[in-house]
Amino acid sequence: MHTCCKCLLNDNIPSVKINSSGLCNYCTVSNETLIDRNTVDEEFLDLLEKYKNRKYQVIMAFSGGKDSTYTLKLIREKYNASILAVTFNNGFISESSLKNINVVTDYLGVDSLIVKYPIGKLINAFKFVKDGKVFPRMSLERASSICNLCIMLIKNMIYYEAVIRDIPIICFGWTPGQVETAKPLLKLNYRMVSKVFDNVKNAIVGEMGVEYEKYFLNSEFIEENEDKVPYLYYPFVKNSYNEEAIIEDIKQIGWEFPENTDGNSSNCLLNSYANQCHMEQFGYHPYAFEISNMVRAGCMSREEGAEKLEKVKNDSSFELIKKIFQNT
Amino acid sequence: MNSTDVKDKLLIFFQNNILYNGSMNEIDGDESLIDNGYIDSTGIIGLVTFIEKTFNIKVYDHEILPENFDSINSIYMYINSKLMP
């Protein structure tokens, strides 16, 4: 196995090639430089102004982790947006994270909604997707298959809640390393929204049964509400991201780092198990791309990135979750 | 940039991001990339970013449609239509 001397990607990952100089193909084509992202996003401000009379201008996918907490704080304090923070509780959110959700939303004066599906149903679905067959190879380079399904369920739920509550903007707590886009704001056509969700929906419903249909967007529903399909906002295109600074910032409003999550999650106990399954299946860390993207973009040093990649699992959480999966 | 250049750059992108060690013969030019699990929603956004940066064109939100982005041939035709004077 060879590892890029710049960013940490290794050639166990299918799309990665290391050249004779020790650089990966992503680093050799990248002209990534440190960009001053600490600007005011005028386009976002204009959109908030346009929808100033809505009960909520933004629906925030709020996991209670450090990134979505910082994002929530950012769009609340810097842009004074009215926000509904929606948390998807997959049954494995740490108690500390649930406490963080309460503390943070209380401090920021933000309404909070928690959506929870029956854990038995989720575990069975996670087991079905665990070997990665449902997801594109590029998805599996960004996250474990279990995380991919969880993210898909969250996206479907958030879109649904945004449409029924007439909230014009969706925001996730994606780091710059998780989504590569130069567009801070994006509004997808309803047909594209429907299409990108259908593949996973059909696989899950086909295998698990029609009782799982309600966890995915219905294409007729989206078509009937095509004018309500919300914008997607990616705040870190125009706002800076530094993990150390973020953690210090959100600690000021009462956020505390959970003690029982692994090094790459600050909210979810399932992450440790999901990562380990992924590494056993595919031979590489599911966070390698996100971390390497951030190293390349100057959001963290290579040493900091290497440290995060070494924190693969929290042993106690891993064993607990493994037992739960085995007994379900 | 001529149409051969466009095709070459697109094929490299697909080779690196969708097929990895596979052959481009694996995918029919009109095959649905989304329905057949080659690309997901985040991948579409990454593809848009690639197209804008590589071909120096602006992809408008209303152009991000299945008929423009769901197959190799449709993506190729979309880019060429934007590059035409």
Image (spheres, coloured by chain):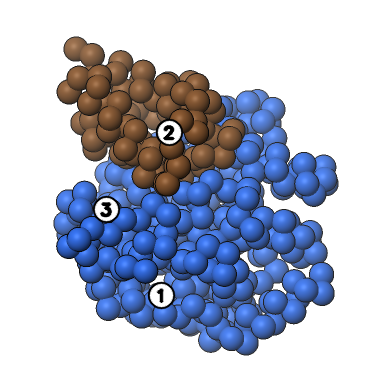
Q: Which chain is blue?
A: A
- Determine the colour of chain B: brown
| Horizontal side of residue A39 vs A226, given as left or right | left
Q: Quadrant of the C terminus of chain A?
A: bottom right
> Dots 2 and 3: beta carbons under 8 Å?
no
Q: Tell me where residue B9 sits by quadrant.
A: top left
Q: Chain of mark 1?
A: A
Residue A11 in view: yes
Asked if badges 1 and 3 are on one and the same chain, I answer yes
Residue at the disc numbered 3: A25
Residue type at mark 2: give it.
Answer: Met
Distance of mark 2 from mark 3, alpha carbons? 19 Å
Q: Chain of mark 3?
A: A
The picture places residue B42, in percent across and down from the top left corner, at 46, 45
The residue tagged with tag 2: helix, strand or loop? helix
Residue type at mark 1: give it.
Answer: Leu
Query: For the residues carrying marks 1 and 2, which lies nearer the camera in this image?
Result: 2
Q: Residue at x 59, y 43 (%)?
A: A159
